[in-house]
């Protein structure tokens, strides 16, 4: 093997497209840019969302509603659901850690207990929020409520 015998591997090199060099290039006339129009011109830049003169979608659709940036989303559990969860998972303390370990909430979820249904088990609740009705029902069943921030 000598230096004058070396060649690149098969398929490693490609022939350069010679655009704008007349008919002999095989890409003559329009140089692969089609016929006329904005995109055929020099200096063309495509801006995001530009629809070629058609009214853009962000202007066609109406503005509606309001999204409150300070809204707090809770993962909600009713007392009736909690009774079923106690039977199914054998929970003695209704806390964020127990719920996470059983796959009922994610690490970042905030949990709120609501008062729909009946609670028969005596439980300790360590959650982010509790409704008034739920709190009275829990304390009537002999349980305690602790608000965790």
Image (cartoon, rainbow, N blue to C red):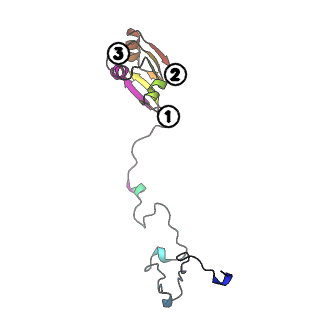
User: Mark 1: few, some, or many residues within 10 Å (few <14, many ≥20)?
Assistant: few
Above or below, comparing residue 68 to residue 89 in the picture: below
Work out how far the residue at label 1 is from the one at label 3, CA to CA, in angstroms: 32 Å
Instruction: Give yes or no for residue 67 being in the magenta stretch.
Output: yes
The residue lying furthest to the right in this view is 3
Query: Which residue corresponds to mark 1?
Result: 70
Q: Position of residue 74 (x, y in %)?
A: 43, 30
Q: Say whether residue 56 is left or right of residue 43.
A: left
Task: In this rendered view, identify the residue nearer to me: 63 or 81.
Answer: 81
Work out how far the residue at label 2 is from the one at label 1, CA to CA, in angstroms: 19 Å
Q: Are marks 2 and 1 in contact (CB under 8 Å)?
A: no
Of callouts 2 and 3, which one flags the residue occurring earlier in the amino acid sequence? 3
Q: Are marks 2 and 3 in contact (CB under 8 Å)?
A: no
Q: Which mark is residue 119?
A: 3
Magenta part of the chain:
60-88
Q: Position of residue 110 (x, y in %)?
A: 47, 29
Query: Which residue corresponds to mark 2?
Result: 148
Give the foreground label among 2 and 3: 3
* Rendered-image quadrant of the N terminus: bottom right
Give the foreground label among 1 and 3: 3
User: Mark 3: few, some, or many residues within 10 Å (few <14, many ≥20)?
Assistant: many
Q: Position of residue 64 (x, y in %)?
A: 39, 45
Task: In this rendered view, identify the residue nearer to me: 99 or 29.
Answer: 99
What's the residue at 50%, 90% (across, down)? 24
- Give SS at disc 2: loop
Work out how far the residue at label 2 is from the one at label 3, CA to CA, in angstroms: 21 Å
Above or below, comparing residue 107 to residue 13 in the picture: above
């Amino acid at each position: 093997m000598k230096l004058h015998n070396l060649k690149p591997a098969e398929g490693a090199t490609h022939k350069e497209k010679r655009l704008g060099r007349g008919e002999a290039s095989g890409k003559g006339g329009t140089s692969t840019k089609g016929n006329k129009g904005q995109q055929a011109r020099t200096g063309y830049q495509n801006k995001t969302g530009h629809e070629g003169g058609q009214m853009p979608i962000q202007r066609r659709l109406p503005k509606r509603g309001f999204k409150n940036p300070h809204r707090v989303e809770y993962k909600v559990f009713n007392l009736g659901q909690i009774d079923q969860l106690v039977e199914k998972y054998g929970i003695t303390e209704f806390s964020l850690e127990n719920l996470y370990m059983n796959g009922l909430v994610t690490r970042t979820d905030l949990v709120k207990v609501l008062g729909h249904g009946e609670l028969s088990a005596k439980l300790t609740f360590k959650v982010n929020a509790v409704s008034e009705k739920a709190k009275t029902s829990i304390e009537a069943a002999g349980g305690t409520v602790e608000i965790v921030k």
